[in-house]
Structures are given as C-alpha cells and as structure tokens.
Image (cartoon, coloured by chain):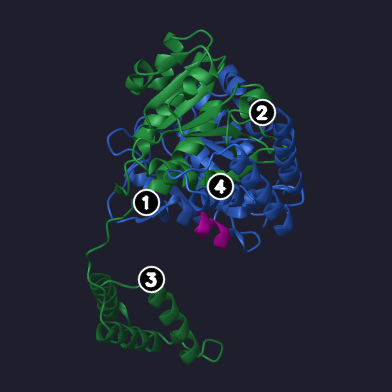
Chain colours: A blue, B green
Amino acid sequence: MTKETNYTFDSVRIVMVNTTEPGNIGAAARAMKNMNLSRLYLVNPRGYPSAVATARASGADDVLSQAVVCNSLEEALQGTHLVIGASARQRNIKWRQMDVVSACAEIKQTTGIKGQEVAVVFGTEKFGLTNEELDLCQILMTIPGNPNYFSLNVASAIQVFAYQNYVYNTTTEFEKSENVLASYQELEGFYAHFSQVLEYIEYFEDKRPKALLMRRLRRFFGRAEPEKEEVAIFRGILRNIKPYLK
Amino acid sequence: MTKETNYTFDSVRIVMVNTTEPGNIGAAARAMKNMNLSRLYLVNPRGYPSAVATARASGADDVLSQAVVCNSLEEALQGTHLVIGASARQRNIKWRQMDVVSACAEIKQTTGIKGQEVAVVFGTEKFGLTNEELDLCQILMTIPGNPNYFSLNVASAIQVFAYQNYVYNTTTEFEKSENVLASYQELEGFYAHFSQVLEYIEYFEDKRPKALLMRRLRRFFGRAEPEKEEVAIFRGILRNIKPYLK
C-alpha cells in the first residue's frame, strides 16, 4: 500500500516534556507506531510507568518499553542535530516558525545525512513548551487549527505530526482496477441501442429533444468511464426490456 | 494565524458507527472542534451519553450536546450528497479509493455548491466499516500508516482527517520579522573588520588559508541572512575584543 522513499523514521525522536497524564503517553506511543515512529523520550513524566499508559498504548507497548526517561530536556536532546518544538499557536517571532509540512521537509533534509538525528518536542498538556524550553529549539512547528478553540490533546498533536511526517516520506499507491474499459465501438453500440429503446418508448418529445438528452446521457456514462463488462450489463438490460414492451 | 479560504466546514458531518468506547466519542468531539468541525452523528453508540465522553471532550461539549444520535447509518446519511468511508487499510478494489488529501479535494468541490453536504463515516474500534456500510459510500478514504502495525484509534483517525481537511481549506500565514536586514555595505564592512581581527590574532596560516576561511565564514553568515542589528552586535563584539589583545 505505501512505499517508504527513505528510511529516516529511525532518526526522529519524539520528546514529551513534563507530561501529567500517563494515558497521553500511551496514546502517543500508539500514534507513533501507527506512523512508523518508535523512539520516545520522556522528560519527568508524572505517574509513569503506569497501567493506564500501557492500556492506551494498545499494542504499541514495545515503543513504551523502549522509551527513554530523562531528568531534563537537555538530557533528552543529547545526540540530536535539529530540535523542533511543537506549538498549538504562533509564538513570538523570535523563533523561526513553520507549519507541519515545512517542518517535515526540514526533518527529511536533516535525517538524509546518515547519523543526523532530529528531536520533535511536545510540552505539557496545559501550557505546552515554556520559553526556556523553546530556546533549545531551532524551529517552532505550529499545528494549525480553529482560532476560537485550540485545545489539542498532546497525543493528538503527536498523531498529527506523525501522520504528516509519514505522508511526507512515503508514497501511497492504490491497486488499480484491472477490468478492461469499454472500447469506443462498444460504447457507441450501447448509445445507439439505448437511443433506439428510448425512441421506441417515445421518451423523446419536444421538451426532451433527442439530441440534448443523448448528449446528457453520453456525458453521464462518459464520466463513469464504463468498463467492458458494465456496458455488457446495460445492453443486457436493454435487451431484456424488449419483450415487455407493447 | 490561519485564514479560511472557504466556509465549507459546516457542510461536513462526521459519522461514527457503532462506537463501543464513549471516551472515543468525547475525544472525537475534541479533535473535530480543534479543526473547526462541529457536526457529529452517532449511529448506535454504546454507553452514550456518558461522563467519560464529556470528560474526554474537554471543552468541546457543545459538539457533543449537538450530536445527532441515529438508529442506522442510512438515517445518519439523510440529506448528504457525498458519502466517504474511512478505512485504515486498502480494501477490495470495487470501491473508489483515495488518500486523505484527495478526499479533502472531493469534499471541497462538493461543499462548494451551497446546500451540498458531505458525510465522512468511521466504523467500529475493532473492525472499522463493514462491506455493507461501505456500499453506502461513494469513496473509500484510506489513512496511510505503518504496514506492520495499523491500529489507529478511531478518534485519532478523525483527528488526522480533520487536520488534513483544515489544512486543505485554510492558509497559514506566519508573522514576518520586521527587522531590517543588513545591507551589502554593512555586511562587507563586517567581513573586512572580522578578517582584520583574524589576521591580528594570527588565525590564518598555511593550513587555514585566508581566502578559504573567509569564504566559509561568508557562506555561514550569508545563510543566516543577518539583520542590521545582528551585524551591529557582531561588530560590537569585534571592537570589544581589541583592548584585550596584546
């Protein structure tokens, strides 16, 4: 279904700072694993580890069990080359701000060089990141949303970032129908047959001129790009109408 | 921060079918409101209304209180003009499949005509939508993700869609710095000053040729697009070094 165009996912760590609800840590682990991220750093998590976190992780407990618990944000950032702070709103212009897609572009560029790591940092449920924490970030990534209600759950924010990062780094290909399309001749044969039947049942009249109605029917069927078998079905219907006509 | 380019949000309803965990309904309401959606339809929700749902809604209780509870999916789809089913994986090719961005494009086109409504339908936590439910959908929207673990929480799936739909229909503008950039003359003056100081401290030598090092320093400073005030800060530093040099 999806094909990774690079292997940068392992170079991205999610850092959660001073998270107060262990359930959000579990939900974050699940959000990450769904989008191919696995490296979680927890700075002073409250009430963690916890059964609530494990329950909410729902099968992403490997992400939880590998999570690195740190005493400070500085500790969690050791070994990284680009630090991105997440914010639900725009902040003071002293930080370089960008939207999620642009942040993903920076991440891709940075992790494209082997050994370069990126941290994406999320603050507390109530207040997000402090200014002092943002001072450790080179980029402030802003998640857009309803200006009249912005109360994004921290695990939801991680979900949004992780989704965007996944989409940015993969291509999705949908299985194509292998059914053969109707040929020009088959379509024209069908329209001719259809038109004959409509004439026979006296469908066309002054208010329903043949030329106009046939054009509309062609427009409709053409838009659906009929398959060979589908045209055969319609012709079968037309044939089966005949015996019932007076 | 963000500017809506159209007002289609009111024409989109989120339909949750047979949701088993009321907490997910609350989380979905919160996810929706954050991304400017407000119309929630609940088909046979289990254990709803519930205090858990309200707690998880966290301020989006208006979305919950306006939610329409239905006895069937058919009832929830009354009045819509386009029905999109959400799926965490690709299904049989008999449905027209597309990714989230493409689905948002279809939604924008449909809701662009006044009075036309769109439903985006999400199935149960465990199994998603049934084939019979998908038969009521014109489009199957596939949320991409880790092929080895796809267990997206239903509220997280709604969050992902709602985010993508918000981004698709809004433009985000970041406040630009109003600080004046350094002029060509100011930059050149700085480089000359810098080079003088480096010569004075005998930084340049055979292994650190002046031409090469100055080019690298120019490259670095040029990339940062220095502001007038920043160049003034650096020149101040250079001036303050002087008295301390032998």
Residue B151 figure quarter: top right
Which secondary structure dominates the residues rendered in magenta? helix
Q: Which mark is residue A61?
A: 2
Q: Is residue B175 above or below residue B41?
A: below
> In front here: A212 or A221?
A212
Measuring 57% from the left and 14% from the top, which residue is drawn there? B20
**Distance from Cα at disc 2 to Cα at disc 1:** 32 Å
Measuring 63% from the left and 25% from the top, which residue is drawn there? B128
**Which amino acid, by three-letter code, is at mark 4?**
Leu
**Distance from Cα at disc 2 to Cα at disc 4:** 56 Å
Q: Is residue A42 visible?
A: yes
Q: Which mark is residue A217?
A: 4
Q: Which mark is residue A135?
A: 1
Q: Is residue B4 magenta?
A: no
Q: Is residue A63 above or below residue B212?
A: above
User: Is there CB contact under 8 Å for labels 1 and 4?
Assistant: no
**Which amino acid, by three-letter code, is at mark 2?**
Asp
